[in-house]
Image: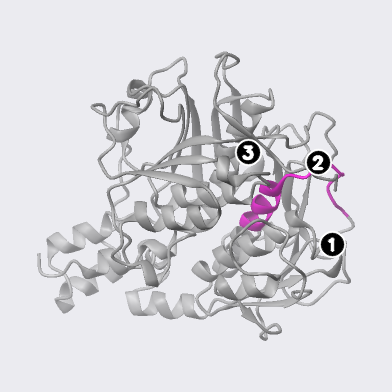
Amino acid sequence: MTNFVPAETLHRLVKHAIDSGAAESIAEAEALFKGYRLHLEMSAEAAADPVQQASLLTAVALGRRVFLGGVTVSGSLGTGLTVPLPFGKTLADAVQALGGLLRGKADGAPTVIIGGGPIQRRDGFCIRTAAAGWRGGILPGHADLGPGAGPVMPLAGMLAAALAINEVYLFLNGGAPATGRRSVGLSLWRPGPEVDWLAPDDCEPTLTYLPSRLWLIGLGHLGQAYLWALALLPFAKPENVALVLQDIDVISPSTESTSILSDATLIGQKKTRAIAAWAEARGFHTAIHERLFDASFRRQADEPAVALCGLDNAAGRRALDQVGFDFIVEVGLGRGHRDFRTMRLHVLPGSRSAAEIWKVAPAAETVEDRPAYSRLLVEGALDRCGMTLLAGKAVGAPFVGAVAATLAVSEVLRLLHGGPIHRLLDIDLLSLEQRVASGHPGDFGRINPGFALAKCNRPV
């Protein structure tokens, strides 16, 4: 092999453009993404609300990884930071720390308004995020709609932001004709398709108990999104939270394109150590494991019994229910240019073993015949082996992992609040209304997952 560089440096949505045939070279695909811009506007009435702040900061963190022409932010940004993230004292501080630009909207940029009520109809693409209770989603900016009130739940704000970034990307890509003109959302308490996310839900509990002992397996796209979600939760005493972080990889240039906590300053560092430093800045305690997760691994009795899995290989997943965890939430994401918006969540142990669920690894898409790959081969940038390596890399988008993380962490929160647990959640962000939610037949009532108390919250 003559050149490994593109596989480790290529932006995972730029790869979407070359794999789908939308661009005939890497240079053309990169130029396309550098033309993508986003404007975020923080509504004055929402600025101090921690749920809406969670939406804004999640949208900045995700958006600047997708829209390489820049994410500009305006509105009430002098407000003090009420969401518990380690990014300064004000919203403006946090926006800049996450890579957003404090300025007005550039001509033609799609706009996402964070929170607030309906606005006058505007020219161009304009949607707004909406979150209340355990429900989050997006609406046209002018729509006279909004979710009914419910208890404070920051992950609803994270969910709304991730759905907004997905909607803008769909609009810019021409992926769906109704983008920007529809209501899209779901409930994290009852995520099935039968639940109207705009309707108030008396079943939603006040967020009282939060997980205090968790094992994160894999610290890439999903693992970092899990930690972002955990960091948004209102722990009364974050120092009571103990996390075990397990991974064997280092942060590469391409990691930043999908992973919400990675940036260029961390390239070459072990993921475990970089992510542990971020978690400890949030106030959590961490331990790290830098060894491969497989069937030979064994959890010790004094270690966390609840795991969030972000592995992207079937071999590791097959071992999940063999190593001693009491409760495992696992999410798999689509890898190809056609299915990268899909996610499938499992809670284990279940009626089927992990080895049975992942008995056969899914077949990868064949993309080597796309023009961009042929050009790399002809120009000598890659030999055929290097081209195969590049083609085998996954397409990925950080907003997909963010949606998945809200669902995964919510499974643990529902466990702590006596809510429904799911054997399976199957979702495609291209058609969220067609999602599948299947209840878990198991009884987890005797599990002691460990919990910490949440700060007192007011309804919104």
Using the image as rendered, state which of residue 185 and residue 443 is in the foreground: 443
CA–CA distance in space, label 3 to label 2: 27 Å
Q: Which span is picked out in magenta?
A: 145-163
Task: Say which mark, if any, is on residue 434.
Answer: 3
Give how far across and how far down residue 26 sits, in percent: 33, 74
Q: Amino acid at mark 1?
A: Gly
CA–CA distance in space, label 1 to label 2: 17 Å
Residue visible at 83% across and 41% down in the picture = 150
Task: Determine the image quadrant of residue 438.
Answer: top right
Task: Say which mark, if any, is on residue 116.
Answer: 1
Give how far across and how far down residue 37 sits, in percent: 58, 77
Q: Amino acid at mark 3?
A: Gln
Using the image as rendered, state which of residue 234 and residue 7 is in the foreground: 234
Mark 1 or mark 2: name the one nearer the start of the chain.
1
Question: For numbered disc 3, what is the local secondary structure?
Answer: helix
Task: Determine the image quadrant of residue 215.
Answer: top left
- Give the foreground label among 3 and 2: 2
Magenta-drawn stretch contains 334: no
